[in-house]
Structure formats: structure tokens, C-alpha cells
Image: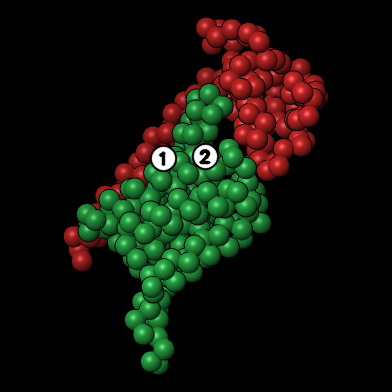
Chain colours: A green, B red
């Protein structure tokens, strides 16, 4: 039961962060670069409710935020980035050899490159390869920041989940 | 603890090395061409139009139903989208393109502008 509630909260968090992100225009003008705020919810989910539930959250987030703030193409494009990103993060977490900020950084990088790949296929061009270095560095930096936020937030949320009412 | 740090460093290192390698590839390609060649207008994966970068021109690119448009502006050897009626306006915010292989993509309109320099003549200029 508690798990259902936490999932609901995380999904709401993911959607509101997607919305906030859609309000912030990035002046860089490079396709595929995102701050990846919503990734915070996915990272938190991985550590709070386990990988399987986090995967469910990833898919619902991509589909719902696409429906709410985008269109069908956006969903496809989001889903590809989100799934590739999630799978690498889950594998890295399982390996147990990396800290959360780095796991999240790789998630950010994979999210950007995954979207780029889908864009390549949809518009059938390889010219976008030009932007790869920018996508890599941007994903690395934003992912690290998001991961560090998650490290700071996690202990508090865990405390709340394990009987916050008693305090 | 330190074992994790080692893993962290390896991963971050790989990403930075990859970024540098791709950046160098870009630099080498930049040297070879800039401000020459044509801007290809590709819609749904087919080349529909081609404009030389050497001529200043402003042209409205309509789709077949004449509902979607992107305003292409070529000036001083570089091309950009100065206006469009797509929902996200990512193409309008994209940087101007001038070098071989650079492109501007408007995903909602399935439109790609890309620069092809003269030496890459293996591709047909107009097939649509």
C-alpha cells in the first residue's frame, strides 16, 4: 500500500518537473539537450521502490508528459531516451561499483544520446552527429547535479517512509 | 568506498574522452569546409530543395498541405530558421549552420536543413 502511495507521489513529481522544465527555454539551441529535472524522480524511485517499479515510473512519465506537454513524436523520442537511460542506470546500480551522482550522470548522457539516435532515424539524417560532444558534456553535468540532489534528498524521504508519523 | 571512486573516475573519464574525440572530429571537418556548398532542405527524409550558401536569400518553406512553414534565411554564408509555426520552436532557436554536415532539425514538421559542401557530390542535389 505504502509503495503505491510513494509511486503516485514520484509520478506526480516527475510530471511537475517535466512541466517546469518545459517552461525553461535553453538558450543553447542544440537539439536533444535537456536539463533532465524529471530524471530526479526516476533516480529516487530506483532507490526507494526498486528497479522494477522505477521502470514502470519511467514509462508512465515519458508517455504522460508527452501527452500533456507534447505530441506523438515527442512521446516516441522521450521513450527512447528514457528507456536507454533507465537501463544503463539500473545496470550500474546493480554492479554496485559507482556512486549515485555518476550513475545519474551516465543516465543523463544516455538520455541525450538516445533521443539523438531516434531523431536521426525519424528525420533520416546523420548530420546531428555534430552535436554529440555537446550532448555528452551537457548530460554529464546535468546528471551529476541531479544525482547529487538525489543523494541529499534520499535520507529524508527514507526517514519519512519508515514511519514519519511517529516523529 | 575507494573501489566505488575508481569506478566513478573511469566512467567520467570515458565520457570526457569520447566528447573530446568527437569534438576533434568536428574541428577537422570544420577546417575542410565552411560557408561553401548548399543548404539541402529535407522533408520526410527526401531532399526537396537546395539553396547555395553563397547567395543571401530569405524563403518560406511550406509543406505540401501549406499548413506548416519554416522561414529559411541565408546570410553571409550561413543559414538559419528565423521563424516557424511549429509548437516547440527548437529550429528557430538553433544556431546558424555553415559547415558541412551541420543541420537544423524541426522535428514537428519533419524538416531538416543540412549543409553539404561541393566535394560531397555523391548525393543528388534534388531528388524530390
Identify the mark at residue A76; answer none if there is no mark. Answer: 2
| Nearer to the camera, B91 or A164 | A164
Q: Can residue A146 be seen?
A: no
| Left or right relative to B9: residue B114 | right
On residue B19, which mark appears? 1
Question: Nearer the observer, disc 1 or disc 2?
Answer: 2
Residue at disc 2, secondary structure: helix
Q: Secondary structure at mark 1?
A: helix
Eyeballing the image, is A93 above or below B108? below
The single residue placed furthest to the bottom in the displayed view is: A167
User: Could you classify mark 1 by the number of other residues whose Cα lies within 10 Å: few (under 14), some (14-19), or many (20 or more)?
Assistant: some
Q: CA distance from mark 1 to mark 2?
A: 26 Å
The quarter in which the N terminus of chain B is drawn is bottom left
Instruction: Name the subunit of mark 2.
Output: A
Q: Nearer the viewer, residue B118 or A53?
A: A53
In this rendering, do the residues under marks 1 and 2 share a single chain?
no
Name above or below for residue A49 compared with residue A89: below
Residue depicted at x 76% and y 35%: B84
Image x and y of residue A77, in percent? 52, 40
Badge count: 2
Residue B31 lies, with reference to residue A96, above or below; the image says above
Callout 2: few (<14), some (14-19), or many (20+) C-alpha neighbours within 10 Å? some
Give x and y (percent) for residue A114: 44, 40
Please state, as top left, top right, bottom left or bottom right, where the C terminus of chain B lies in the image.
top right
Name the disc covering residue A63, or none: none
Amino acid at each position: 500500500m505504502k509503495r503505491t502511495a510513494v509511486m503516485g507521489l514520484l509520478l506526480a513529481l516527475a510530471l511537475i518537473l517535466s512541466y517546469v522544465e518545459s517552461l525553461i527555454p535553453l538558450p543553447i539551441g542544440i537539439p536533444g539537450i535537456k536539463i533532465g529535472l524529471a530524471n530526479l524522480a526516476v533516480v529516487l524511485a530506483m532507490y526507494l521502490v526498486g528497479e522494477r517499479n522505477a521502470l514502470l515510473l519511467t514509462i508512465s512519465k515519458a508517455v504522460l508528459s508527452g501527452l500533456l506537454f507534447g505530441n506523438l513524436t515527442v512521446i516516441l523520442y522521450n521513450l527512447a531516451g528514457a528507456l536507454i537511460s533507465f537501463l544503463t542506470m539500473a545496470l550500474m546500480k546493480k554492479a554496485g561499483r559507482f556512486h549515485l551522482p555518476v550513475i545519474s550522470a551516465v543516465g543523463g548522457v544516455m538520455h541525450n544520446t538516445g533521443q539523438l539516435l531516434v531523431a536521426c532515424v525519424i528525420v533520416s539524417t546523420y548530420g546531428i552527429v555534430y552535436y554529440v560532444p555537446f550532448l555528452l558534456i551537457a548530460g554529464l553535468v546535468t546528471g551529476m547535479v541531479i544525482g547529487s540532489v538525489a543523494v541529499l534528498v534520499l535520507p529524508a524521504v527514507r526517514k519519512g517512509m519508515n514511519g514519519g508519523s511517529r516523529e | 568506498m575507494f573501489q566505488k571512486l575508481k569506478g566513478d573516475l573511469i566512467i567520467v573519464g570515458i565520457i570526457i574522452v569520447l566528447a573530446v574525440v568527437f569534438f576533434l572530429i568536428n574541428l577537422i571537418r570544420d577546417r575542410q569546409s565552411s560557408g561553401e556548398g548548399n543548404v539541402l532542405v529535407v522533408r520526410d527524409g527526401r531532399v526537396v530543395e537546395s539553396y547555395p550558401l553563397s547567395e543571401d536569400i530569405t524563403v518560406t518553406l511550406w509543406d505540401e498541405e501549406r499548413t506548416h512553414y519554416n522561414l529559411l534565411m541565408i546570410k553571409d554564408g550561413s543559414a538559419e530558421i528565423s521563424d516557424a509555426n511549429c509548437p516547440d520552436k527548437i529550429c528557430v532557436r538553433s544556431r546558424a549552420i555553415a559547415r558541412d554536415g551541420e543541420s537544423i532539425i524541426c522535428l514537428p514538421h519533419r524538416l531538416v536543413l543540412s549543409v553539404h559542401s561541393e566535394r560531397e557530390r555523391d548525393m543528388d542535389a534534388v531528388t524530390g
